[in-house]
Image: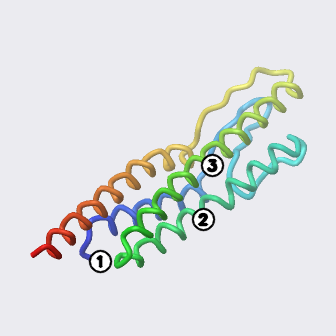
Amino acid sequence: MLARIQTLYLVIAALLACSSSFLPFWHFTAEESIVLSDFAPVAEAGLIHTTTLYLSSILAPLSALLSIAAIFFYSNRRLQSTMIIALILLFLLDLLSGLAAAHFMNEWLQNTSSSTLEHAPGAGFFVLIPEPLLFWLAMKGIQKDEKIATAYKRL
């Protein structure tokens, strides 16, 4: 279980998913500086902004928990592969919900602010980017284990 390379990939992906919850996802600067991060919506920005931000706040820790849980299914490689596919889908939902929250915050700030608006992605956004690569590498490790196991069974 611990000696397999996919364990390392899944642990790193879990750490990245957890850290994205604590790091700012997007920075906005208008008349004041506003930081978009999990569990900190701006209620005035609208219901869609609040909903998508809370969805992102739930999906990041959920993907971290599922990454850790997938490690313990080392004896059932088919289930482990299915969990990794689900993790890739969770990553996409997490990224899209965070981007939607940033978009609706941007729209709200453009409508309410009289000064120029500047915005840039934060560390929470960049921490999410390597996750699908790590999931793909873990999937390749599982496929390699399956290939070795079937060759061993033939002997």
Q: Which residue is mark 2?
A: 61
Disc 1 residue crowd, few under 14, some 14–19, many 20+, Cα 10 Å: few
Image quadrant holding the C terminus, namely bottom left
Q: Which residue is mark 1?
A: 2
Q: Earlier in the sequence, mark 2 or mark 3?
A: 2
| Front of the two marks 2 and 3 | 3
Q: Amino acid at mark 1?
A: Leu
Image position, residue 121 (x, y; %): 59, 37
Q: Quadrant of residue 40?
A: bottom right
Q: What colour scheme has been applied to the protein in the rendered image?
A: rainbow
- Is residue 51 toward the left or the right of residue 27 in the image? right
Image position, residue 32 (x, y; %): 78, 36
* Residue name at image x 41 percent, y 76 percent: 73
In the image, residue 79 sits, relative to residue 33, either above or below, namely below
Q: Give the camera-side residue of 143 and 92.
A: 143
Label 3 to label 1, Cα distance in Å? 29 Å
Q: Amino acid at mark 3?
A: Leu
Q: Quadrant of residue 84?
A: bottom left
Q: Earlier in the sequence, mark 2 or mark 1?
A: 1
Image position, residue 39 (x, y; %): 74, 58
* Residue name at image x 26 percent, y 71 percent: 4
